[in-house]
Image (tube, grey):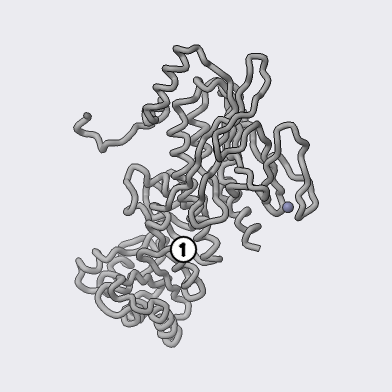
């Protein structure tokens, strides 16, 4: 073992499929010794999406980087696609289809699934929070609740899923935005005086950084909010990170702070809340506050359970034979989507494209051919394009 290591897989190790499960290597060994090198079609479908009737597919660009150079064809939904695990007929929806000799990609199944299960879970949760928060601000504070090695991954998912800001410096840098944050309790405790700490922050930190005072360190939130508003002339907002032991009726605390600020002429001072908040809290408080700091709800979001299954095997003559294990739908398929209502329909490979029964417009093939014989033939989207794509889809389902 490398003594200096944080026990991490390197990018090189991931690309070489060293994080895979050992049974794939044993399968490869058996297949090679039996000269059973067959061409297959495999699908990646979601078995379950926890607490949601839809998911946002994320990690596709990683999957393409993982598989590039292998002699296979890869079709996927675009990164950031909103999908359901089944269509209206109960057919599992393929998010990725790979065509090629099984031995050419067998060992990549584990890292492939790892990328999309993990990232889709975090991105889906962020998107759900984005919807719940309406037009209010959502900041990702989750770096401290995740393994540091994956904080840029958390930041990526949080940003494309609709967060307005990222507190993690490296995450924000990789995403391409300026990091955002407020004031930690430690600064106030070191000064032993809230007002002195807020004023020192105001004195030394560039004016471009919004002044948002943390107002729950020593006194009641109402008292500290008023003190902050009176002490800092260009105060943008106050943050309530009220500890759970003091929370009581958090809604009433927020309403009281709002009332007292308004009553003293500080109606422009915004209220932000943080501290173990989840989607349910965002739904509950969205009309009362101006923004949320979200941590582990995103960075420790449950993964979406994707599985990869062989659905068709090609004969030596190139004829496809449908095959599937119990619980899966066999045969090669097409995935169609209505661009207007985002309804997905899965049809057999040979069938003609259909119409959306709701919108009466033609549905379009949804999977994009991304790799042809291992070569990338599609354009890699930018992070901003992916984020815009996700936000536009959320607007459709918001209606
Ligand atoms: Zn439609």
Element at label 1: helix
Q: Nearer the viewer, residue 185 or 310?
A: 310
From the top left corner, tell me how far across and down residue 69 is, in percent: 52, 22
- Residue furthest right in the image: 360
- Residue furthest bottom in the image: 263
From the top left corner, tell me how far across and down residue 85 is, in percent: 58, 47
Is residue 369 visible in this depiction of the protein? yes
Task: Determine whether 33 is above or below 354 in the image.
Answer: above
Q: Which residue is mark 1?
A: 279
The answer to which image quadrant residue 272 occupies is: bottom left
Is residue 74 visible in this depiction of the protein? no
Task: Determine whether 11 is above or below 249 in the image.
Answer: above
From the top left corner, tell me how far across and down residue 332 is, in percent: 65, 31
Please state if 255 lies on the left or on the right of 394 as rendered.
left
Quarter of the image containing the N terminus? top left
Residue at 48% over, 45% down: 305
């Amino acid at each position: 073992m490398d003594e200096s290591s944080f026990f991490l897989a390197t990018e090189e190790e991931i690309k070489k499929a060293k994080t895979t499960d050992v049974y794939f290597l044993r399968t490869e060994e058996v297949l090679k010794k039996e000269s059973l090198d067959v061409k297959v079609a495999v699908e990646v479908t979601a078995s379950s999406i926890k607490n949601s009737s839809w998911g946002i597919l994320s990690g596709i660009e990683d999957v393409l980087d993982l598989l590039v150079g292998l002699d296979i064809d890869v079709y996927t939904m675009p990164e950031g696609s909103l999908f359901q695990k089944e269509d209206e007929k109960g057919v599992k929806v393929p998010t990725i289809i790979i065509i090629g000799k099984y031995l050419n990609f067998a060992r990549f199944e584990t890292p492939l699934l790892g990328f999309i299960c993990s990232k889709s879970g975090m991105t889906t949760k962020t998107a759900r929070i984005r919807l719940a928060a309406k037009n209010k601000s959502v900041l990702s504070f989750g770096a401290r609740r995740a393994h540091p090695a994956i904080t840029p991954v958390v930041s990526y998912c949080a940003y494309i899923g609709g967060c307005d800001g990222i507190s993690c410096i490296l995450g924000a840098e990789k995403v391409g935005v300026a990091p955002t944050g407020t004031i930690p309790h430690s600064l106030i405790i070191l000064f032993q005086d809230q007002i002195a700490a807020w004023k020192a922050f105001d004195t030394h930190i560039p004016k471009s950084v919004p002044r948002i005072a943390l107002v729950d360190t020593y006194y009641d939130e109402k008292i500290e909010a008023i003190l902050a508003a009176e002490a800092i002339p260009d105060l943008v907002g106050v943050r309530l990170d009220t500890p759970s032991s003091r929370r009581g009726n958090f809604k009433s605390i927020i309403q009281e702070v709002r009332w007292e600020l308004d009553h003293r002429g500080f109606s422009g001072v915004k209220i932000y809340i943080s501290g173990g908040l989840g989607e349910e809290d965002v739904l509950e408080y969205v009309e009362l506050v101006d923004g949320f700091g979200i941590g582990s709800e995103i960075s420790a979001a449950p993964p979406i359970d994707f599985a990869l299954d062989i659905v068709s095997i090609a004969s030596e003559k190139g004829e496809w034979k449908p095959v599937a294990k119990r619980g899966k739908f066999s045969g090669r398929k097409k995935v169609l989507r209505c661009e207007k209502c985002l309804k997905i329909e899965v049809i057999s490979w040979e069938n003609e494209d259909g119409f959306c029964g709701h919108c009466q417009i033609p549905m379009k093939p949804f999977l994009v051919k991304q790799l042809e014989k291992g070569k990338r033939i599609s354009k890699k989207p930018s992070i901003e394009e992916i984020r815009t794509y996700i936000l536009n889809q959320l607007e459709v389902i918001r209606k």
